[in-house]
Image (cartoon, rainbow, N blue to C red):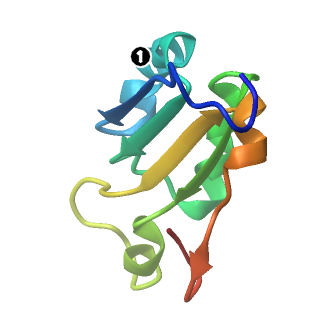
Amino acid sequence: MNGTQLEGLSLCTYNMHGFNNGVSFLKQLCSNNDLIFVQEHWLQNSQLHMFNTTDDQFKFYSNSSMENRLSKGVLKGRPFGGLGVLWRKDLNAIVSTVIQRGELL
């Protein structure tokens, strides 16, 4: 696939219900998709590197919804939130990230 042709691009969205719960299916999604949007990975910023273990043909950007809550003390209840995007490395020429007010868009 070249950087100007998007025909045949396959994408999906996936609610992970926690990274540990959803990572095995995420690996399967990587085999059939070029672009994957994930929600509810429940990771902290210090854990986002775990996406590196998903598939070596993919890059990712992600953010955590947990940081602000954890900065206020011990978490009560279950973890929550988190968004991310994974894309095939051969799409690097046409993928860019936008950071606004410290948040990934």
Q: Residue at x 64, y 39 (%)?
A: 50
99 or 24: nearer the eye?
Answer: 99
Q: Position of residue 20 (x, y in %)?
A: 44, 30
Q: Residue 100: x percent and y percent?
A: 56, 83
- Residue at 28 percent across and 37 percent down: it is 17
Q: Secondary structure at mark 1?
A: helix
Dot 1 crowding, Cα within 10 Å, few <14, some 14–19, many 20+ = few
The image quadrant where one finds the N terminus is top right
Asked if residue 15 lies left or right of residue 102, the reply is left
Viewer-side residue, 90 vs 25: 90
Outermost residue toward the bottom?
A: 101
Q: Position of residue 22 (x, y in %)?
A: 39, 26
6 up-or-down from 78: above or below: above
Disc 1: which residue: 25
Tell me which corner region of the image, top left, top right, bottom left or bottom right, holds residue 89: top right
Q: Amino acid at mark 1?
A: Phe
Foreground of the two, 34 or 101:
34
Does 59 sit left or right of 74 as displayed?
A: right
**To which quarter of the image does residue 81 belong?**
bottom left
At x 55%, y 89%, the residue is 101
Q: Position of residue 98 (x, y in %)?
A: 61, 71
Residue at 50% x, 68% y is 105
Marks counted in the figure total 1
Is 34 drawn above or below residue 27 in the view shown? Answer: below
Q: Give the vertical position of 91 relative to 57 (above or below).
A: below
